Image: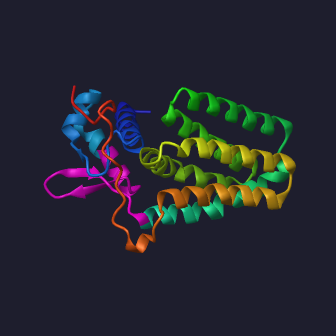
Amino acid sequence: MSRKHNSQDKAYSYIKDEIISLAAHPGTPLRAQEIAAYLDVSRTPVREALSRLEQEGFVMRQDGWGYVVRPMTPQDILNLFTVRESLEVQAALEALPHLTKTVLNALATNLVKAAALLKQERYAAFRVLSRAFHLAIAAASHNDLLYRLLATARDRILLVGAMHQDMRPSRAQEVQAENSRIFKALRSGTAEAVKAAVLDHIRASRASILPVDPGNAPAAKARKPAAKRAKLRKR
């Protein structure tokens, strides 16, 4: 891989991580010159990274500012949950015939590690591990297309999760309990129980972050990050 591509990937990963962790909250200007200086790369790979993120819907162009972090509207969030309902339920159902002892042990280990992260109040790491739990179920489905679709949605789901955590810190504990119920349903081997557990988890998340009709709500914006969080900055 060329140095240019390495620099672009470095900039892409850095900016996306800042966005999905809410270190760069919706509306934050993304100045290529400052990011390039911070990462010690040229501006060209940073601009290319921003272009990639624009195509993925994480940033948008703004006259006079270049790029800014794109806010998610309530409809964007509702659409994401609608997609999750279809894909995650199907993935869990298709995984049932392939749930070996190894797969179940891996899921159980994930839950133990997630519980430890909650006790340490490491919520960002918890969200990543929780998403890995669901992707592991999708991988067990042996449906490559289904897995790739959910993997593609991963970062957007993490972004909504970070917004959710800012709004309702107690939600992480609820997610852990819901994941545990999904695991128990998978272990039971009962399709009806699996479908119900996955749907309960997704719908509880949707109701918690979207308590009103999206058609009547303003654009969803994350609260301004706490001062301890890093912002996109120049060294």
Relative vertical location of residue 138 with respect to residue 63 in this rendering, above or below: above
Q: Which residues are magenta?
A: 48-74
Quick check: 18 left or right of 210? Answer: left
**Residue extending furthest bottom?**
215
Residue 12 lies, in percent from the top left, at 38, 40
Quarter where residue 180 is shown: top right
Relative vertical location of residue 57 with respect to residue 175 in this rendering, above or below: below
Quarter where residue 133 is shown: top right
Residue 167 lies, in percent from the top left, at 42, 49
Q: Quadrant of the C terminus?
A: top left
Residue 175 lies, in percent from the top left, at 61, 46
Whether residue 57 is in magenta: the answer is yes
Count of numbered marks: 0
In the image shown, does 165 or 13 lie closer to the viewer? 165
Whether residue 52 is in magenta: the answer is yes
Residue 162 lies, in percent from the top left, at 45, 45
Residue under the point 37% across and 42% down: 22
Q: How is the image coloured?
A: rainbow
In the image shown, does 50 or 133 lie closer to the viewer? 133
Residue under the point 29% across and 56% down: 60
Relative vertical location of residue 165 with respect to residue 218 in this rendering, above or below: above
Quarter where residue 76 is shown: bottom left
Q: Quadrant of the N terminus?
A: top left
Residue under the point 22% across and 41% down: 32
In the image shown, does 208 or 26 lie closer to the viewer? 208
Quick check: 77 left or right of 148? Answer: left
Residue under the point 52% across and 33% down: 125
Quick check: 212 left or right of 190? Answer: left
In the image shown, does 37 or 122 lie closer to the viewer? 122
Quick check: 64 left or right of 192? Answer: left
